[in-house]
């Protein structure tokens, strides 16, 4: 988390409200090392929280008015009362993420009161690093500082944030992004069982860096295609007579998959094989076996390209550039919903500069843009920023 971001948010609050904030909270973005589109299939994922965050500076009010200032949107404002029904707005869209979490907490009978707050963040937007989950979890974490909410757990905040996106904003996302933002552990990825919500910390090997490459390919199809993929997965689960594709293994797929149409079979094959890869990856990463992790990440990318069909040529090219530099010493794959966005790599520290140089030299994205490169640390989940 950037000290510059903290200072910027604090200063913006002081300039707007004429006093220092009483409390500051943060919630990180995330990158998913492996396990794509498995979360809404009740499967397994292996994300890490990253050191890019949403920060909120706030003070409690004596009334039940919530007043939000978005420092990153020319200090645009939203204000509403906790005494009245919290309605969805047509514009600005960012306000609905805030309103959705607060409405969920109100509906659950939590003792909320008003806040003045300024929100700012450095999670890249539109890149698949979960700036929206970072925002919603940060809002939940702020309200969890109120008296009477001491028993609100990270998982409670994560699920409130997911419900806000599902039921208020209208995005049918799974729960991975919110859980890792709320519950991340420094120096570790988390293997998340998206059905039981059990999390298992998996250490990132010493001497390995997480590199993220924003292709700058805008993910224009991601919402409609995401919902299409979800419907296809649900249809496949119904064919097998199970709650979700989490319950289908390779043997069942081989035995009964012939009853599916060709496209739905490919979608199911990705989910079934990806769940197996996540379990194997958690084991490999825990043992510090970057070579095995690299094999699994390569297989994941091929499955997303060929079976789930969510990569695009520039993403495939970017993956190839990185793989040509790191060889068997690490791994690289597309990460996120697909159709653009980011590539993630686990790279030995000694290879960070050669990888950066190769991508800078060899990759050209839309309109002549190169890739935006981030070198990240696995970071803690949401919390109060120390004074």
Image (cartoon, helix red, strand yellow):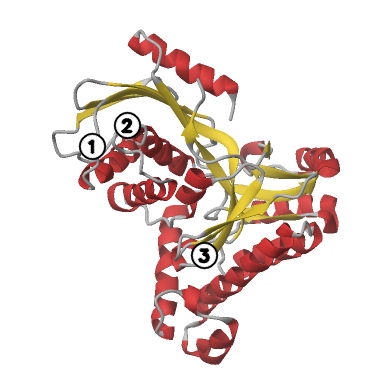
Asked if residue 110 shows in the view, the reply is yes
Residue 275 vs residue 168: left or right? right
In front: 226, or 205? 205
User: As displayed, is residue 387 above or below residue 271?
Assistant: above
Whichever of callouts 2 and 3 sits on the residue coming sooner in the sequence is: 3
Nearer to the camera, 222 or 185: 185
The quarter of the picture where the N terminus appears is: top right
Q: In the rendered image, which quarter is residue 366 located in?
A: top right
Disc 3 target residue:
38
Disc on res. 111: 1
For image coordinates 61% across by 73% down, the residue present is: 273
Residue furthest to the bottom: 255
Determine whether, in the image, residue 263 is placed left or right of residue 93.
right
| Image vertical order of residue 25 relative to residue 175, above or below | above
Give coordinates of residue 300: x percent, y percent: 65, 64
Of tags 3 and 1, the one toward the viewer is 1
Q: Which residue is mark 2?
A: 146
The earlier-in-sequence mark between 3 and 1 is: 3
Q: Label 3's element?
A: loop
**Residue 162 image offset from top left, x and y in percent:** 38, 51
| Residue contact at pointers 2 and 3, CB within 8 angstroms | no
Q: Which marked residue is nearer to the observer: mark 2 or mark 3? A: 2
- Where disc 2 sits, the SS reads loop
- At x 34%, y 48%, the residue is 160
Q: Are marks 2 and 1 in contact (CB under 8 Å)?
A: yes
């Amino acid at each position: 988390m950037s000290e510059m971001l903290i200072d910027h948010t604090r200063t913006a609050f002081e300039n707007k409200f004429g006093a220092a904030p009483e409390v500051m909270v943060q919630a990180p973005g995330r990158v998913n090392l492996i396990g794509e589109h498995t979360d809404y299939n009740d499967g397994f994922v292996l994300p890490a929280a990253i050191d890019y965050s949403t920060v909120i500076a706030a003070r409690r009010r004596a009334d039940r008015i919530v007043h939000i200032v978005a420092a990153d949107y020319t200090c645009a404002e939203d204000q509403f009362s906790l005494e009245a029904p919290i309605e969805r707005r047509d514009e600005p869209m960012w306000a609905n993420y805030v309103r959705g979490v607060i409405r969920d907490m109100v509906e659950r009978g939590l003792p909320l009161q008003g806040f003045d707050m300024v929100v700012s963040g450095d999670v890249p937007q539109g890149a698949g690093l979960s700036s929206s989950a970072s925002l919603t979890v940060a809002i939940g974490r702020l309200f969890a500082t109120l008296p009477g909410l001491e028993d609100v757990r990270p998982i409670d905040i994560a699920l409130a944030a997911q419900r806000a996106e599902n039921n208020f904003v209208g995005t049918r996302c799974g729960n991975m992004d919110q859980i890792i933002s709320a519950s991340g552990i420094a120096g570790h990825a988390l293997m998340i069982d998206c059905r039981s919500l059990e999390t298992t910390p998996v250490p990132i090997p010493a001497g390995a860096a997480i590199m993220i490459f924003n292709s700058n390919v805008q993910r224009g199809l991601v919402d409609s295609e995401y919902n299409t993929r979800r419907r296809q997965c649900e249809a496949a689960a119904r064919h097998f007579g199970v709650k979700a594709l989490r319950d289908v293994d390779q043997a069942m797929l081989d035995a009964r998959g012939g009853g599916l149409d060709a496209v739905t079979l490919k979608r199911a094959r990705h989910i079934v094989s990806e769940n197996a890869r996540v379990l194997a990856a958690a084991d490999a990463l825990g043992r510090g076996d970057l070579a095995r992790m690299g094999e699994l990440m390569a297989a994941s990318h091929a499955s997303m390209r060929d079976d789930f069909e969510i990569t695009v040529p520039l993403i495939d090219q970017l993956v190839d550039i990185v793989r040509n530099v790191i060889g068997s010493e690490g791994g690289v794959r597309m990460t996120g919903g697909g159709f653009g966005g980011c590539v993630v790599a686990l790279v030995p520290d000694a290879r960070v500069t050669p990888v950066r140089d190769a991508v800078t030299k060899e990759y050209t994205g839309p309109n002549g843009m190169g890739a935006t490169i981030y070198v990240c640390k696995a970071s803690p989940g949401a919390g109060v920023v120390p004074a």
